[in-house]
Amino acid sequence: MSQLMRSCALAGMMASMGVPALAQAPSGNYECWFFSSPRGGLNFQLSGSNYVGSDGSRGVLTGSAFKGGANDGVRYQYKGGNPPTFSILGPRGDEVSVCQLAK
């Protein structure tokens, strides 16, 4: 099976499981929170799969974690919604913060 066919099959499986593709995350500034407390150190600006962290450093979003930049190694799950939301995940996979597209 070609790489393209494998990628399409994987995207189809993820869509059928209700997992939005990262490509669907709109570009913009995302502000992060823990309940009603801001978590400014996690804030980021997204453009495609590239991001700029709160400290100005650059990195990319892989399928499940930030790579490089201020949030290097931080795991996430993109949830979509209105406003578009990322869940920041702790070591056990539980949600420890949320980041939403700022208006």
Image: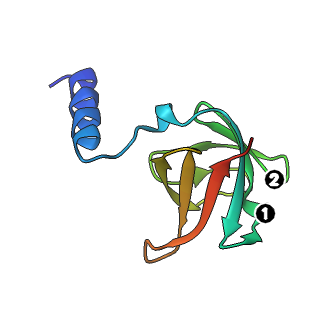
Farthest right residue? Answer: 55
Tags 2 and 1 touching, CB below 8 Å = yes
Residue for point 81% across, 53% down: 54
Say what amino acid the circle numbered 2 marks.
Ser
Snapshot quadrant of residue 92: bottom left
Q: Position of residue 79 (x, y in %)?
A: 46, 50
What numbered label is drawn on residue 41? 1
Give the left or right position of residue 21, taking residue 86 as reference.
Answer: left
Vertically, is 27 above or below 57? above
Residue for point 48% across, 49% down: 78
Say what amino acid the circle numbered 1 marks.
Gly
Give the left or right position of residue 61, taking residue 37 as reference.
Answer: left
Disc 1 element:
helix
Residue for point 59% across, 33% down: 26
What numbered label is drawn on residue 54? 2
Does label 2 or label 1 sit earlier along the sequence? 1
Q: CA distance from mark 2 to mark 1?
A: 6 Å
